[in-house]
Amino acid sequence: MDKIFLNGMQFYAYHGVFEAENKLGQIFIVDVTLDVDLKQAGESDALEHTVNYGAVYEDVKREMMVQSKLLEHVAERIAKTLFNHYNQIMALKVKITKQNPPIHGVYDGVGIEISRERQ
Ligand SMILES: Nc1nc2c(c(=O)[nH]1)N=C([C@H](O)[C@@H](O)CO)CN2
């Protein structure tokens, strides 16, 4: 299946199970991959025949600003919003990374990734 991707979107937000995370906030990196048939847009050269990734960015940003405890909950909200707004999306992946969570140690980041198909 063809893909549309938005990689490395950065948002300052307040998700976390610890009070300090909810108060101080931190940077979240979000990657979204959408399964969309891109053939019609490839032939017509018309934006209305595809999913506008600029509009998807705004949807992701809006959901990132709604506070949750778990990254799983944020990702699930993003997935539901995108399926609701864009009929062309057949399946998607949402990955959310915390680069500097309150976990002592050396690592690039921690996070979750979900894969969902249109029901
Ligand atoms: N599977 C998950 N595990 C944890 C999460 C989460 O969102 N999903 N969150 C936390 C804390 O908020 C983390 O940022 C610091 O420990 C812990 N584990």
Image (tube, rainbow, N blue to C red):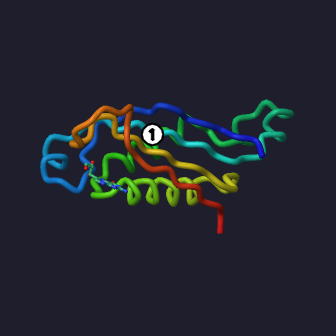
- The x, y position of residue 81, in whole percent, is 50, 56
Residue at 61% x, 38% y: name it.
52
Left/right of residue 27 with respect to residue 7 in the rendered view: left
Most extreme residue toward the front, as rendered?
105
Observer-nearest of 71 and 52: 71
- The x, y position of residue 20, in whole percent, is 13, 47
The C terminus lies in quadrant = bottom right
- Residue position for label 1: 30
Total residue callouts: 1
- The x, y position of residue 6, in whole percent, is 55, 35
Q: Is residue 95 above or below residue 6?
A: below
* Dot 1: element: strand
Query: How dense is the environment of label 1, judged by Cα within 10 Å: few (below 14), some, or many (20 and up)?
Result: many
Disc 1 CB within 8 Å of nearest ligand 1 atom = no
Observer-nearest of 39 and 34: 34
Left/right of residue 110 with respect to residue 46 in the rendered view: left
- The x, y position of residue 80, in whole percent, is 51, 60
Most extreme residue toward the right, as rendered?
43
Q: Quadrant of residue 13?
A: top left
What amino acid type is highlighted by mark number 1? Val
Q: Is residue 97 above or below residue 79?
A: above
Most extreme residue toward the bottom, as rendered?
119
Residue at 15% x, 40% y: name it.
24
Residue at 29% x, 57% y: name it.
68
Residue at 64% x, 46% y: name it.
34
